[in-house]
Image (cartoon, helix red, strand yellow):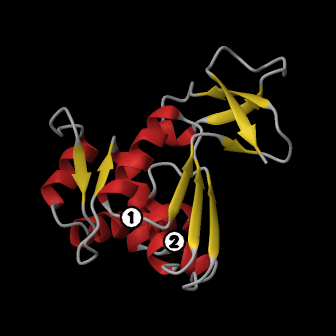
Amino acid sequence: MTARLARKHWYRLRSIWTMLAGFDNPSQTIAIFTGRASPGEKTISPRGTGLTFAVRDAMDVWCLKETLLDRVYERFGFAIEPGWTVLDIGAGIGDFTILAARSAQQGHVYAFEPFPESFALLRQNVDRNRASNTQLFPTAATGRPRTLTLDASSGEPLMVESIDANAEDAGDGPEIASTT
């Protein structure tokens, strides 16, 4: 086994422990990852935060782990200050949006999410967690106004790509407007 592969497996093993210890309902986390979660709304609450998130699947839970338990934005970036204005481009289900809203309580967070299913969860999670210093936009953010096609062919909502609607490989996904 190569060192890289060993690190990858070690990261995954540590991540399992992090999620089981870091979320309030470990059995719900296990059920989501094993595909045994009950149909309907699934929620995850990071322990000790007072936050609750509606999630679709294991990828959403993994993103919550990285943002709220591993604190990757602070470890590999910087801590958000109280009065900052923050842009969250590709806001997904709102994990970073809500973290930023809590950190920049006297500031404002602008969150952009073009994929309708993710935007619905973003809105739900922002409302559920009372992140009142946010403004949500159901659009893509680009360098110039244009129409994009969303490619969701991966089957994973957090892996949706946007392609210029006029491109040859734009596909037949839903078209969305972008903002600058």
Give the residue drawn at x 57%, y 76%: 107
- Residue 152 lies in what quarter of the image? top right
Mark 1: secondary structure:
helix
In this image, 165 relative to 57: left or right? right
Give the residue drawn at x 42%, y 48%: 123
Task: Identify the amino acid type marked 2.
Answer: Ala
Q: In this rendering, does residue 29 appear at all? A: yes
Point out the tag, 1 or 2, that comes first from the N-terminus.
Answer: 1
Task: Identify the amino acid type marked 1.
Answer: Lys
In the image as oriented, which residue stretches furthest toward the top? 172
In space, the residues marked 1 and 2 are separated at their CA atoms by: 15 Å
Which residue in the protein does label 2 denote? 100
Give the residue drawn at x 52%, y 81%: 106
Please name which of the two marks, 1 or 2, marks the residue nearer to the observer: 2
Which residue in the protein does label 1 denote? 65
Q: Is residue 7 above or below residue 156?
A: below
Mark 2: secondary structure:
helix
- Residue 35 lies in what quarter of the image? top left
> Percent position (x, y) of residue 164?
80, 29
Q: Is residue 40 above or below residue 25?
A: above
Judge by depth and name the residue closer to the eye, 171 or 27. Answer: 171
